[in-house]
Image: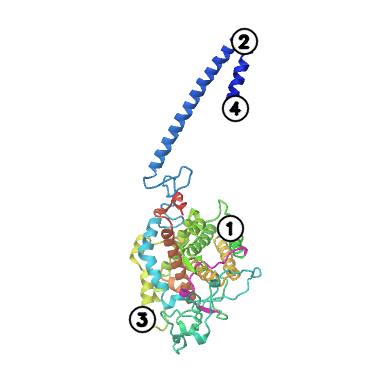
Amino acid sequence: MTVSEAGTRFRHSSHRFLPSGTVLDMAGELEEHRRRRSRFWGWKSWTLITLTAILAVSVAACGRQHRISLFGFSTKECKCTSPHKLTGIVEDCCCDYTTVDTLNDHVLHPLLQDLVRTPFFRYFKVKLWCDCPFWPDDGMCRLRDCGVCECPEHEFPEAFKGPSGQLPVDDLKCQEGKPQAMVDRTLDKKAFRGWMETDNPWTYDDETDNSEMTYVNLLLNPERYTGYMGPSARRIWDTIYKKHCLKDLPGDASTERRVLYKLISGMHSSISAHIAKEYLLDEGKNLWGPNPTLLFERVLKHPDRVRNLYFTFLFVLRAVTKAGDYLSQAEYSTMNSLEDQNTLSLAKELVYNKRLQSACPIPFDEAKLWKGENGNELKSQIQLQFRNISALMDCVGCEKCRLWGKLQILGLGTAMKILFSVDSNDLINQSAQLQLQRNEVIALINLLSRLSESVKILHDLAPENAIKDGQIAVSSLQSL
């Protein structure tokens, strides 16, 4: 006997003991119950059909080419989601996002790429072996590529050994066959002439002290992923933001303090962009390539970090254009006349570029800062904060990271030295007021090039139309 049959027999047998009126009443109730169930399921069916139709229309509205799973997984980006917009003028600056992108693509990026490859701008003097002034250096770098290879003198290219001290143009050899690691140690007085020995009040390192300095060929030590991670790396950034940069700024924080934070944040975003562009995808195969997911996680999904990158780019660009007369008359001498003439020509093209002057004549207006009774005191406080940040670069436990950290911090310090030490209204005496060391100029131009490259990376690695006219479409970036 089946369960159904048993149930039927039980119902039938039980009814034999009920009065006939009661049975009729129950039959009526059962019929009413069936009608209610029919109406209920009919309503549910129409509701399901209606919801299905609405969902189909919504999918169609996102574009026929974009497929959406009913379970929430997207194979293509859906542009229905409202984007985080970065339209209009870059905050605290004097240019809009569209203009910055256009100038960078057609003027600044190609020009800066040529400039930093010249012999004068490719060699950077740096002190890589310093004790951390804040805590014992316990940083461990996971990759061999995080180190900077120092070539012994007897293995320098022949051009390094000549009496003229002339720097080579394209020799990228190193004793270990690793062009990423070469260090050039040509003496300062032989390599460069005509520059003042002056210190930068915004940075910790004494730029006039040549002891324990080494020359690094920046083209052979690219800024990229090194494997430097963990507590040591996190402690550097945590200390910068929490102790020296005032990450959690109150709503009434001064403009000057916000500027300091945005400069550091913008530089941080730039560093992350370069790591994402040249990432070690397969260590066993030594395969390098872009990592869009990393770029999304560290930069693109945080609109404030993108805004701060643009802000830092314009801030440094303003410093370069403000020092235009100085930079156009500098002696870019490496004792290679053709290369030196080309370097000077590129420098003049940068600082006197007509398209730049027309579209964005004053990228950042520094004249609005340091106003009020406490202006000078506030400048001294922020200058001390930045010096402490620069000192933290000696605590970076990865040589290559320390190299690029020191270069970019010196570049930012040089930009602040230009903008905050020279009277913008005294056009006649600006060049007389400004004294730059060769290493400061090299750091400044290389930093501007790094920032320009980072802005380009955002567009190159992000999905098509994810950033347009300064807009970051979060919905499309999530497809990375």
Q: Which badge, 1 or 4, comes first in the chain's sequence?
A: 4
How far apart are the alpha carbons under marks 1 and 4?
74 Å
**Disc 4 crowd, CA 10 A, few/some/many (<14, 14-19, 20+):** few
Kindly indicate whether the residue at mark 4 contacts the one at mark 2 (C-beta within 8 angstroms): no
* Tag of residue 3: 4
Residue type highlighted by circle 2: Pro
Q: Is mark 1 on a helix, strand or loop?
A: loop
Residue under label 3: 338
Which residue is disc 1 drawn over? 246
Q: What residue type is labelled 1?
A: Leu
Dot 2 or dot 3, earlier in sequence: 2
Crowd tier of the residue under label 2, counting other residues whose Cα lies within 10 Å: few below 14, some 14–19, many 20 or above = few
Outermost residue toward the bottom in this view: 163
Q: Nearer the viewer, mark 2 or mark 1?
A: 2
Point out which mark residue 1 bears.
none
Specify whether residue 218 is painted magenta.
yes
Secondary structure beneath dot 4 equals helix
**What x and y, as percent, mark residue 23?**
58, 13
Q: Name the residue under label 2.
A: 19
The answer to whether residue 242 of the structure is visible from this angle is yes
- Part of the protein shown in magenta: 213-231
The answer to if 141 sits in the magenta stretch is no
